[in-house]
Image (tube, grey):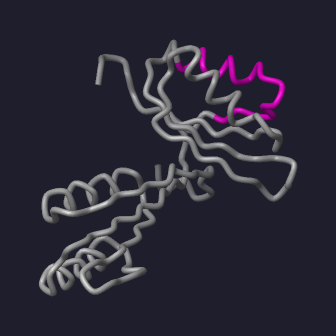
Amino acid sequence: MEKGMKKRWISLYVENQVGVLSKISGLFSGKCYNLDSLTVGTTEDPTVSRMTIATVSDDETFEQIKKQLNRMVEVIKVIDFTDIFIRMKEILYVKVRDCSLEEKIELFQIAETFKGRVIDRGKDSLLLEFVQTAAKNDAVVKLFKEEFKNIEVVRGGSVGIESISMMEH
């Protein structure tokens, strides 16, 4: 990563309307900012959605991103998650095909070790699910790439909320 660049997290409350996601992602692409991850879902209020966005930038660029987001009519609130205590998880699915009985046994052990679970199985394949931090899921993906030849990986973006106890960042 370039000097001064670091991973940044933003949470947005936005109006739950058609086209809002497109406008937010358009702001990033129009300014040549890269979105590492973007997750969106409705909140307890059906008229409001919450987005969690990950990007890598320097301090100056990140301040510009936040200012531009705050100027958008559809954005209700911008929360900078970068330096506050948050609870954040992402979902990861790994499908392993063409595996032997020994490999299946190893996959069950990997699932147990990495707090995942086997959620589907076939004659020669298994589907595993992990819900943990992006960094832990990175480690899981690395392990699967090293150990198995025929894998398929699907990751959802991270979702986060401000921590109550402030014990985890």
Q: Is residue 42 left or right of residue 156?
A: right
Could you tell me which residue is drawn at 81 percent across and 44 percent down?
16
* Residue 78 image point, x, y percent: 70, 32
> Residue at horizontal 55%, vertical 21%?
29
Residue 94 picture location, percent across and down: 34, 65
Q: Is residue 17 visible?
A: yes
Question: Residue 13's spot in the image, x, y percent?
Answer: 75, 40
Q: In this rendered view, identify the residue nearer to me: 102 or 45.
A: 102
The number of numbered discs placed on residues in the rendered structure image is 0
Query: Magenta part of the protein: which range?
Result: 62-79
Q: Residue at x 40, y 64 (%)?
A: 93
The residue depicted at 81 percent of the width and 31 percent of the height is: 74
Vertical arrangement, residue 5 with respect to residue 127, above or below: above
Q: Could you say where residue 169 lies in the image, as x and y percent from the top left?
A: 47, 49
- The image quarter in which residue 115 lies: bottom left
Q: Is residue 40 toward the left or the right of residue 128 in the image? A: right
* Nearer-the-camera pick, 132 or 150: 150
Task: Give the answer, above or below, for where 65 lies relative to 9.
Answer: above
Q: Is residue 58 rendered magenta in the image? A: no
Decide if residue 73 is on the left or right side of residue 103: right
Q: Quadrant of the image for the N terminus?
A: top left
When asked about the image quadrant of residue 4, the answer is top left
Horizontal side, residue 20 vs residue 7: left or right: right
Residue toward you, 31 or 133: 31
Q: Is residue 83 among what the camera can see?
A: no
Q: Is residue 71 magenta?
A: yes
